[in-house]
Image: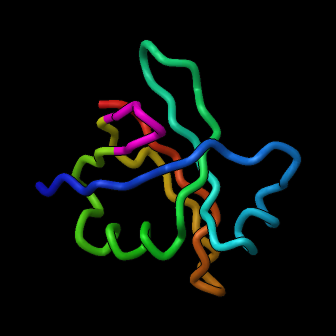
């Protein structure tokens, strides 16, 4: 399986998920054993391009100077419009 690399940022305070998506980002979360759950956002276009090649593989996520290896736990999608709504990463 492939190992896709993706840069994530901390989610902006005071913005709801709809506002984040309108700004071109996909809201999400990162959680797992040994870390506190983090609310994140990912550039939607970059995520879609990487997801096409790596739907089942592991992801190398970069948050500032930290690096995490994770898998997609859940990807929420509006099937009527084909719009991605939220992504959840779980540490491997």
Residue found at the very far bottom of the displayed protein: 81
**Percent x, y for residue 88?**
52, 46
From the viewer's perspective, is 55 left or right of 16? left
Looking at the image, what colour scheme do you see?
Answer: rainbow
65 magenta-colored: yes
43 magenta-colored: no
Residue found at the very far front of the displayed protein: 65
Question: Which range is magenta?
Answer: 61-68
Give the quarter of the image for residue 10. Answer: top right
**Percent x, y for residue 38?**
60, 32
Q: Give the tally of numbered discs.
A: 0
- Identity of the residue drawn at 81% across and 43% down: 13
Give the quarter of the image for residue 6. Answer: bottom left
Quarter of the image for the C terminus: give it. top left
Q: Is residue 5 above or below residue 44?
A: above
Majority secondary structure in the magenta region: strand
**Percent x, y for residue 17?**
77, 58
Q: Is residue 55 above or below residue 38?
A: below
- Identity of the residue drawn at 58% across and 41% down: 29
- Identity of the residue drawn at 35% across and 34% down: 68
- Identity of the residue drawn at 58% across and 26% down: 37
From the viewer's perspective, is 79 left or right of 12? left
Give the quarter of the image for residue 4. Answer: bottom left
Residue found at the very far left of the displayed protein: 1
**Towards the viewer: 21 or 33:** 21
**Towards the viewer: 8 or 31:** 8
Residue found at the very far right of the displayed protein: 14
Quarter of the image for the N terminus: give it. bottom left
């Amino acid at each position: 399986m492939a190992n896709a690399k993706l840069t994530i940022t901390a989610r902006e305070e005071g913005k709801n998920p709809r506002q984040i998506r309108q700004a071109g980002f996909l809201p999400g979360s990162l959680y797992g054993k040994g870390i506190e759950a983090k609310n994140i956002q990912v550039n939607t276009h970059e995520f879609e391009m990487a997801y096409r090649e790596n739907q089942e593989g592991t992801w190398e996520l970069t948050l500032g100077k930290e690096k995490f290896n994770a898998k997609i736990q859940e990807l929420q999608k509006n099937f009527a419009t084909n719009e991605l709504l939220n992504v959840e990463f779980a540490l491997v």
